[in-house]
Image (tube, rainbow, N blue to C red):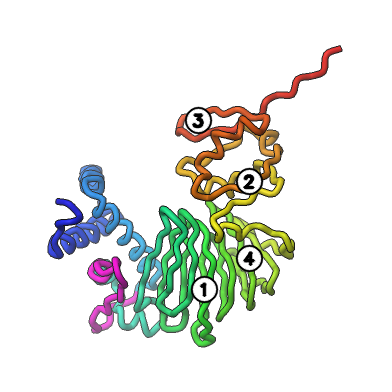
Amino acid sequence: MSEKSISEADYDAITDAAAHWCMRLHASDCTAAEREAFTHWHDSHPLHAFEYAAMLEIWDVADHLPRTEPAPAAVLPLKPRSHLRSYAVAAAICLAALPVAAFTGWEAGWLPNAYERFQASDGLTRVTLGDGSQVELNLGTELVYSHYKDRRQVTLKHGEAFFKVSHDSAHPFIVRAGEGQVRVTGTQFNVWKYEDQVRVMLLEGSVQISSDQVHGSVPLTPGMQASYRQGDATPRVRVMKPDDTALAWRQGKLVLDNLTLADALPLINRYLRKPALLADAGTGQIRIGGIYNISEVGNLIPSLPKVLPVYLTQNQDGNPVLNSIPRKSPKG
């Protein structure tokens, strides 16, 4: 079965199977044999993996809904766009399995009536969300947009995105990233997420940064930056430098301005299939500079021994490891 010749009925069958596996794998009585069968199904065709990933995103949305007694209302399907057509079927299956009426969910602000998923795999990508907001996605970025009755919400799963938010004071725009969120009504800002680290840079307008750990929020004004990571009670806020190069990615560049390897690796690793690691803290203090094309960052790590006092090894998982070359003690 090739993707070029697949019929609509075949596609719907894949979506149904993805919904089935999503529910079974989340069930407490799922057996080892079922998990093995799922792995075989998942790996047997690229569309299986694609539809299952989409199903997991919808399951994540549904998983945050309050569990109440179902009301006598019809399931309200999500409104997918372009390649998300099949998500409506998948969402209906997943949501129908939960004791929540979808119409009630929309009215209460629990369920979105529109759901979009965007991914930038091979190049910088510009997209328009359902509310008209413009978003630029850096390489390796994935985000989900959901439109609720009382708000617009983006979940930045990983990567980096620059937002030009369409103003709508009645429907605040919220970006969830890591263990915090950015709340705006209309503005321009950048959000970067790598592992548990998140950084927000504000260019225009105003935003409120809040942590999942505590109540309350921290305001940002243009020219300010906030960062947080897992376990932080409040974001760390500072003023951006006039020559800050963090947004050079929008021109396809990665600028490392005399950074330590400890600070530079998170910026480099977001473009790598296998993140590079540091052998020790001392290696992390070695400094690096330069301007690189983000499409060629994959060649940067192998070239570092030519310009820095380091050599490369590899751990058991195949990650490159940077090791500092010991300095020779002067004789005498």
Q: CA distance from mark 3 to mark 1?
A: 39 Å
**In terms of depth relative to the viewer, which is nearer, 111 or 175?**
175
In the image, residue 276 sits, relative to residue 213, either above or below, namely above
The disc labelled 4 sits on which kind of residue? Met
The residue depicted at 68 percent of the width and 36 percent of the height is: 281
The span shown in magenta is 68-90
Q: Say which element carries label 2.
A: helix
Point out the tag, 4 or 3, that comes first from the N-terminus. Answer: 4
Q: CA distance from mark 4 to mark 1?
A: 15 Å
Residue for badge 3: 315
Q: Is residue 209 visible?
A: yes
Which residue occupies the extreme bottom position in the image? 170
Density class for disc 2 (Cα within 10 Å; few <14, some 14-19, many ≥20) is some
Residue for badge 4: 201
The disc labelled 3 sits on which kind of residue? Asn
Point out the tag, 4 or 1, that comes first from the N-terminus. Answer: 1
Q: Position of residue 17 (x, y in %)?
A: 19, 58
The residue depicted at 56 percent of the width and 39 percent of the height is: 300
